[in-house]
Image: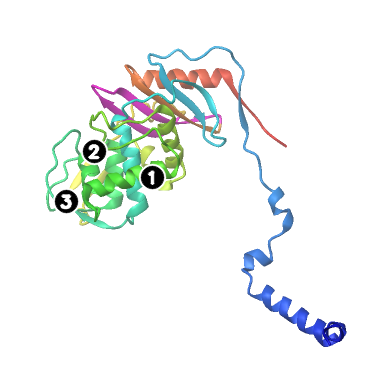
Amino acid sequence: MFSKLIRSRHFYYGLLFGIGLCLAFLPFSFRFTKTNDIFSFKHPPQPVVTGKNKPLLSTNYYILLDNDSNQIIVSQNENSRIFPASTTKLATALTALNIYPLGEVVTISQDYIDGKIMELKAGERVTIKTLVAGLLIYSANDAAFNLASHYPGGISGFVGQMNNLVGKYGLKNTHFVNFDGLHDENHYSTSYDLAQLGRLAFQNPTLRQYVNTKSIDLSDINGQIIHRVTSTNELLGVVPEVEGLKTGWTPEASGTFIGLLNINGHYLISVVAQSEDRFNDTKALIDWAKTNLTWRTYQ
């Protein structure tokens, strides 16, 4: 009986109808994806070091990383623990942009006076975007405080989200206990992990805009209270290859700087830590890269 059924044209018509019905309910993108699309991947240019000498810096804790390929170009003690100081605020900004809409309004809860501040006043109403701008451009601790305290889970919950962020990207040598980088023995990172945070920032248009802003007037939502902020990045607008990112300093950490560098159209992420001269150390990395680095393009 079954053998007669499979030999009948009705069986084949039914089979073809069933296959067509199944295809009709497949996602559009799946049904019409070309099989050769997987071969359209373009390999990023690979950095090639042409010289044998390493850069001469005032610190033994640094890294220079190619943004596109994530390849380490030159480094020293890149996985050794350092104190990140205010470069922490890059993780604060990334976390805030993950959990808040840019236009969300925050009511400043108190006059926060610990460390560098943009002088936000209790009762003032500002957007998340304004706080992120003050955080990244001026390294404002009061902006960091209000981003963290606005979180429904409180400051500890926000810091927990910062740790979740680095954990998500496999940055196992970083741990945060606060939102601004004030010194704590259990608040630490590495040059490599900070470079990876720099790569994450590069992918976010809002962050890239503000880390490359020399100065700006920020206001409350009514435009009545103005905060003039200027970048803490002394290389911005001075060294043409520098397009950001974030500064940091405490007595315990010394100078730290994550740099976004444009070398002949190729983006690099630099980090110097425990530096007595973070900006000149970064300039030395730039000069070394311009002399000792080229890129190989794959056809």
Q: Position of residue 86 (x, y in %)?
A: 29, 32
> What residue does disc 1 label?
165
Magenta region, residue range: 242-264
First along the sequence among labels 2 and 1: 2
Q: Dot 3 lies on which element? A: loop
Q: Is residue 71 magenta?
A: no
Give the residue type that dot 2 points to.
Ala
Q: Position of residue 228 (x, y in %)?
A: 23, 40
> What residue does disc 3 label?
108
Horizontal relation, residue 40 to residue 101: left or right: right
* Front residue of 224 and 67: 67
Relative to 58, residue 213 above or below:
below
Q: Dot 1 lies on which element? A: helix
Residue farthest to the front, as pictured: 1
Please tell me in which quadrant of the rendered image residue 279 appears.
top left
At horizontal 54% and vertical 34% (from top left) the residue drawn is: 70
Query: Real-space Cα distance between discs 3 and 2?
Result: 14 Å
At horizontal 30% and vertical 46% (from top left) the residue drawn is: 160
Give the residue type that dot 3 points to.
Ile
Give the residue type that dot 1 points to.
Leu
Q: Dot 2 lies on which element? A: loop
Q: Is residue 257 magenta?
A: yes
First along the sequence among labels 3 and 2: 3
> What residue does disc 2 label?
140
Q: Quadrant of the N terminus?
A: bottom right
